[in-house]
Amino acid sequence: MTARSIRGAVAATMATVLSLTAAACSQPGGSDGSNSGSGAGDTAVVGIAYEPDSLSPLLGYGKDGNSKIFDGLLALDGNMKLRPALATALPEVSDDGLTYTYKLRRGVKFSDGKPFDAEDVVFTYRTILDEKTNNASRTELDAVKSVEASGDDTVVFTLKYPYAPFAQRTVLPIAPEHVAGRQDVNTGAFTTHPIGTGPYVLTKWSKGEKLSFKANPDYWGGAPKVKKFTMAIIKDDDVRATRLRSGELDGAILPPNLAKGFARDSGTRTYAATTYDYRTVTLPTHNEVAGDTAIRRALDVAVDRQAMVDSILNGEGRAAYGPVPTDSEWFAKGTERTHDLDAAKKILDDAGWKPGKDGIRAKDGVRAAFPLWYLTGDKLRQDHALAYASDAKKAGIDITTEAGTWEVIEPRMEQDAVLAGGGSPADPDFDQYTLLKSSLAGDGFNNMAWYDNKAVDQALEAGRRSGDTAERKAAYDTVQRELVKNPGYTFLTHIDHLYVVKDRFGALTTQVEPHDHGLASGPWWNVEDWTPKK
């Protein structure tokens, strides 16, 4: 899934209005602005929905770029094109696609004053590839055979096979060997007190509340003009909107229905970011109902995706038939599933799932029923779950929706359905491999549905290992067509992210965004380049 296949890397901004009272612009929190929007030109406080488990890139933090604390060898610009970061240029690639050579910037220092060099790059990649490291994204670097330093300013990667999107993987943040290499990679202090080369330095992480940063005055790219930056962790969508309206926040990510509520106010702008972010229902293979192919196929056509786009997203999104958006060059045309309740009923009838007196179907004494979990406080997931259950019931499938935290949901994923999300705006390997590879079932949030399809496994490997674009396109077409035959997930929508931000920061931009939004994405993807109004 390449970024150029999407409607444009920077979504159109929609100027809206919001009038804030003098009290709303006041600073009820501390002088660092960490509890509230301060109104100060050099301070920004934004509300996000999710909190990272760790701030260590060795454990997966910032792997898609924009980590604020760290830099990668490369970075993505506003048009989602790769640009140099800690490297001085894009890599030199050998003719056979197996060797990538990076020249490094000289004079770069970590925030503790120690110099950055090639050994830090080697340490970072080797540590991630070490099986003792608890990094669920390790398979993303499966192609790496070796990584070696050639002097202080050159790094050479040798690959096992010509992995086409390898350069995109090198936005991965680089960790300092002199700090992270002297402690337990999985539990050491570096996981919560990181040191990097990035534009900001973490000053405090209050779990469940906020992440506070200060500008790195010695940043190689120039000291940021926003001197204090805070990400307030507010999981409940309604609470986030309320705190934005009260002036406690300078900006926030909001679901479409709540963002719409700011349309008649002045003092803010609303930004819409095109995304690869999808919502899907996992249909666990180990559940005797959700794992039944007929049930899966019936749900795939019983669901009214367009109604979800219109009513839940207020049109800010698209129907989803898999992880690949329909306007991507990697999308397999003809795999769209039309809403057809009669077809869903026929699939179930033909498979022996017969309706009972209450309208709910059963087969061999098994009732067509299962639970569907969604994340507490996430209104979008709740609305998707309720709409999905309603559509399913019309076909004779009884789905009970349940809310819970990830601590409650994760142990149940092998048997219970989950309203999940995912998406990465880059290569199709980034999404589909971890989502569908059978060997990754049960590996944290990889392959949450325990999907097991040999044809898909083979196609995923073919797509990953081929350097030929046509061969890769054929492989990912196979994956998408197999999902029509036996959908281990019901994909519902691709969601455009909406952000409301005070206009004192001027006109901002967004990138094409992944699922993991708010923390590294949003209009603050390049906060280090903002020039706030005084």
Image: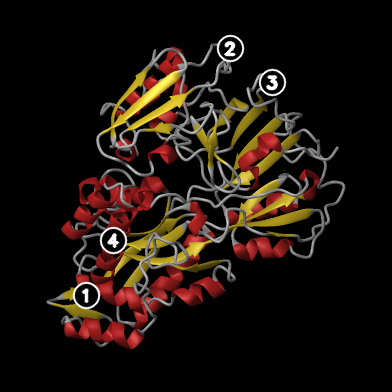
Q: Which residue in the protein does label 3 denote?
A: 217
Find out whether the residues at labels 3 and 1 contact each other: C-beta distance under 8 Å: no
Between label 3 and label 1, give the one nearer the viewer: 3
On the image, the x and y values in percent for residue 533 come to 83, 40
Task: Tell me the amino acid under the disc marked 1.
Answer: Ala
**Farthest front residue in view:** 95
- Give the residue drawn at x 58%, y 38%: 209
Between label 4 and label 1, give the one nearer the viewer: 4
| Mark drawn on residue 113 | 2
- Precedes in sequence: disc 3 or disc 4: 3
Between label 2 and label 1, give the one nearer the viewer: 2
- Precedes in sequence: disc 2 or disc 1: 2
Q: Is residue 414 left or right of residue 55?
A: left
- Give the residue drawn at x 36%, y 84%: 340
Tell me how many marks there are.
Answer: 4
Q: Secondary structure at mark 4?
A: helix
| Mark drawn on residue 294 | 1
- Precedes in sequence: disc 3 or disc 1: 3
Up-down relation of residue 533 to residue 459 (above or below): above
- Give the residue drawn at x 81%, y 53%: 267
Q: Secondary structure at mark 2?
A: loop
Q: Which residue in the protein does label 4 denote?
A: 474
Up-down relation of residue 322 to residue 61 (above or below): below
**Mark 4, other Cα within 10 Å: few <14 / some 14–19 / many ≥20:** some
Q: Secondary structure at mark 1?
A: helix
Up-down relation of residue 436 to residue 88 (above or below): below
Distance, label 2 to label 1, CA atoms, is: 61 Å
- Name the foreground residue: 133 vs 117: 117
Between label 3 and label 4, give the one nearer the viewer: 4
